[in-house]
Image (tube, rainbow, N blue to C red):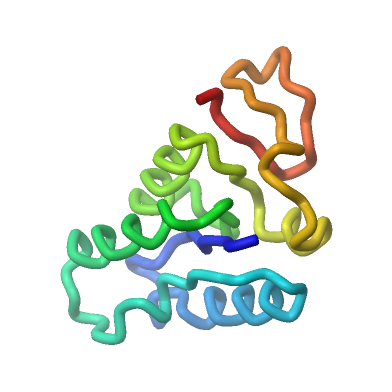
Amino acid sequence: MKLYLSGPMTGLQDLNFPAFHRHAAHLRTGGYEVVNPAELVKDPSTRWEECLRLDIAQLVQCDAVAMLPGWEQSRGARLERYIALELGMAVGDVTAFLLMGPRVRTSYVPQTNNPATARTVPGLSTAQT
């Protein structure tokens, strides 16, 4: 399973790269193929919009999105999550992916936009396609 890491960067020390690298390493050890945005752009002065364009191009080629802590405060991470859900991709906390392992498939995740009727898989969600 190919995962995209999504989380906050802007305004954080070292652009939060240490957290991205740490989580990517754990996921890779767990058997996932990981797209880590902190590895995509090497120049920290690259404009936010340019980074996000590159990130989204990689995101749409993944099977699922693993959200890092604090993603709710990140404009880019919220946009990445929205895109993934609209494309019917599995989205969940990074810890959920670590606990379940790469054998989890997006077909196991409920396909619904209605939280009231969704069967839940802890930490994962998708949008109806």
State the image quarter where residue 124 is shown: top right
In the rendered image of this protein, does residue 5 appear above or below residue 29?
A: above
Residue 48 in the figure: left or right of residue 16: left
Write the residue at 43% across / 38% down. Answer: 82
Write the residue at 34% across / 62% down. Answer: 55
- Tally the marks: 0
Using the image as rendered, state which of residue 44 and residue 103 is in the foreground.
Answer: 103
Where does residue 86 sit, x and y in percent of width and height?
Answer: 44, 32
State the image quarter where residue 97 is shown: bottom right
Where does residue 10 sit, x and y in percent of width and height?
Answer: 33, 66
Using the image as rendered, state which of residue 43 and residue 127 is in the foreground.
Answer: 127
In the rendered image of this protein, does residue 85 appear above or below residue 25?
A: above
In the rendered image, which quarter contains the N terminus? bottom right
Q: Residue furthest bottom?
A: 42
State the image quarter where residue 45 is shown: bottom left
In the rendered image of this protein, does residue 51 appear above or below residue 81?
A: below
Write the residue at 51% across / 25% down. Answer: 129
Where does residue 50 sit, x and y in percent of width and height?
Answer: 19, 65
Where does residue 72 sit, x and y in percent of width and height?
Answer: 49, 47
In the rendered image of this protein, does residue 56 appear above or below residue 79?
A: below
Residue 51 in the figure: left or right of residue 88: left
Write the residue at 26% across / 82% down. Answer: 44
